[in-house]
Image: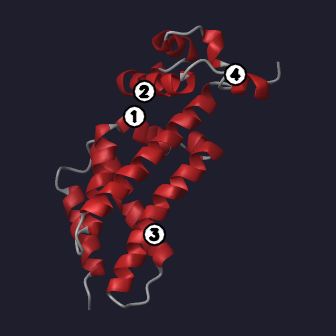
Amino acid sequence: MSLDERRHYHVGNLRARLIEAARAALETEGLAGLNLRALAARAGITAGSVYHHYAGKTELLGELAGSGFADLRRALEQADRAAGDGGRLRAWALTYFDFAHRQPALYGLMFDPTIAALPTVAEPREAALDNLRGLVARVAAQQERERPVEQIALAIWAAAHGAASLTISGAGGDHLMEDVITGLEALFRPA
């Protein structure tokens, strides 16, 4: 049986069970504690069954990180819908920050250089970033000003990511995200 044939073999919702088990293991044991044999046991399957769906640990971690970006995108879209005019940037930043703090190990995996380079991560990451690009474009249109949407979106993403990473590591302090949001909002106030 070829690798492609093994990937299509499936029992019930095994891929979803493996990702769910991997997410739980990642948050409780960290990346170092996540191995395929233990993951298979946690999902209630044999270790060999994992290879019917994934070529190895890196591929599974890529799908896990991609699912993290998909969850982040959905949370950001929900926050955007719930936020009123003038509150979208704050809602986006707070949702991003909350996501990072609720799932710090998954958040770290999503930006791990080896994992982040995988195609299964790139597409959902771009979809999450597209959410921010759309927000920046809507705010710029409301202000009737020409704005470099791509550069602003990347600057906001980098500021939110940096603030979240600093506070997760204990280096940022509780006020850091609020200060970053206040600074970002100042950039968008009409002249």
The percent position of residue 168, horizontal first and vertical second, equals 30, 42
Residue corresponding to mark 4: 9
Is label 1 in contact with label 2 (beta carbons under 8 Å)?
yes
Residue corresponding to mark 3: 133
Q: Quadrant of the N terminus?
A: top right
Q: In front: mark 4 or mark 1?
A: 4
Above or below, comparing residue 47 to residue 62 in the picture: above
- Give the numbered dot on residue 67: none
Q: Amino acid at mark 2?
A: Leu
Rounded to the nearest angstrom, the CA distance separating label 4 from label 1 is 29 Å
> How many other residues sit within 10 Å of disc 3, few (<14), some (14-19) or many (≥20)?
many
Decide which of 152, 142 is in the foreground and name it: 142
Looking at the image, residue 21 sits to the left or right of residue 48; the answer is: left
Above or below, comparing residue 35 to residue 26 in the picture: above
Rounded to the nearest angstrom, the CA distance separating label 1 from label 3 is 26 Å
Rounded to the nearest angstrom, the CA distance separating label 4 from label 3 is 38 Å
Q: Earlier in the sequence, mark 3 or mark 2?
A: 2
Residue corresponding to mark 1: 105
Residue positioned most to the left: 175
